[in-house]
């Protein structure tokens, strides 16, 4: 266990990763299983009390202090791109429930001492890079349409966005660009983190397997992406507080989606259940 691979595992390990084809019902079943995990272990209290409201307040405070009110929405929506990385503890709870093991919150915290964390962090950097790139792209789009002068107030900017042609151009193009970043995150990391937590494959194989899952199941995975996008949009209102519920449910569901899309050798199952 102490010799986990960070970037690339041995070829014979990578070759064992087999991807399944799934349907719409499998996606919905994964979501239902995630809801069951959520209600069984109300992990949302930790998220509600600590992570996302604090993050929302921090982002809003920074945007105001840095005269970057125009970036408030991209910051708040783009921050959710990092959600899969923050949900590592939730995957562990779902994994332990699957094997009828103790699934108390202490195990969700202890998972950060897993030997797989360096590989998980490497993939996490991919999401951080996507988040920063999305914010920079949003800034360039604003400058192209509005110039380099920041808005006088959030309400004045909101009125301009919904009542002018350049505002609607910002809405349409901004969401189109955001969709591309979200799609990139989906393709590269949709099941990467659960896979790394479950098996010693390395970051490269985890990202490659995520892409293989999407290519093997383009329509169901697109459906999953739409579910995630709608849930995150609703959860972001107001000020990311709703994400305290949405992200735990999506985190648990992602574990079950991983189980449905990637075959796990019996030897790995026996090791994971110990």
Image: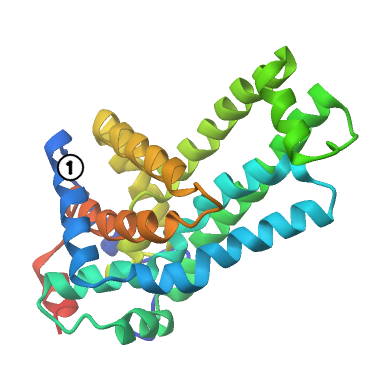
What's the residue at 70%, 31% (across, down)? 158
**Residue 36 shown left or right of residue 89 in the figure:** left
User: Is residue 109 visible to the viewer in this orientation of the structure?
Assistant: yes
What's the residue at 21%, 70% (across, down)? 95
Q: Position of residue 116 (x, y in %)?
A: 40, 75
What's the residue at 49%, 59% (across, down)? 123
User: Along the line of sight, which residue is nearer the eye, 119 or 74?
Assistant: 74
Q: Is residue 251 above or below residue 233?
A: below
User: Along the line of sight, which residue is nearer the eye, 93 or 261?
Assistant: 93
Q: Position of residue 97 (x, y in %)?
A: 15, 73
Q: Position of residue 74 (x, y in %)?
A: 64, 42
User: Along the line of sight, which residue is nearer the eye, 274 or 108?
Assistant: 108
**Residue 60 shown left or right of residue 186 in the figure:** right
Residue where numbered disc 1 is placed? 28
**Residue 270 shown left or right of residue 27 in the figure:** left
Q: Position of residue 119 (x, y in %)?
A: 46, 68
Q: Is residue 106 above or below residue 98?
A: below
Q: Quadrant of the N terminus?
A: bottom left
């Amino acid at each position: 266990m102490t010799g986990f691979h960070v970037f690339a595992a041995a070829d014979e390990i990578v070759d064992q990763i087999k991807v399944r084809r799934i349907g719409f019902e499998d996606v919905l079943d994964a979501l239902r299983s995630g809801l069951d995990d959520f209600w069984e272990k109300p992990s949302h209290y930790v998220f509600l009390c600590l992570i996302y409201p604090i993050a929302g307040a921090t982002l809003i405070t920074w945007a105001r202090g840095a005269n970057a009110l125009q970036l408030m929405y991209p910051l708040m929506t783009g921050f959710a791109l990092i959600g899969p990385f923050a949900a590592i503890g939730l995957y562990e709870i779902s994994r332990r429930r699957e094997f009828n093991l103790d699934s108390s919150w202490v195990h969700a915290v202890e998972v950060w001492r897993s030997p797989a964390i360096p590989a998980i962090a490497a993939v996490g950097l991919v999401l951080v890079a996507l988040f920063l790139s999305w914010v920079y792209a949003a800034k360039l789009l604003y400058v192209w349409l509005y110039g380099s002068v920041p808005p006088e107030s959030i309400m004045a900017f909101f009125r301009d966005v919904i009542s002018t042609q350049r505002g609607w151009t910002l809405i349409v193009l901004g969401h189109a660009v955001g969709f591309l970043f979200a799609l990139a995150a989906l393709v590269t990391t949709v099941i990467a983190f659960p896979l790394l937590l479950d098996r010693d494959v390395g970051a490269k194989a985890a990202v490659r397997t995520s892409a293989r899952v999407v290519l093997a199941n383009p329509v169901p995975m697109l459906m999953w992406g739409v579910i995630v996008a709608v849930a995150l949009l609703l959860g972001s209102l107001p000020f990311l507080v709703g994400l305290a519920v949405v992200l735990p449910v999506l985190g648990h569901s992602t574990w079950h989606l991983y189980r449905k899309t990637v075959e796990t050798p019996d030897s790995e199952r026996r090791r994971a259940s110990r």
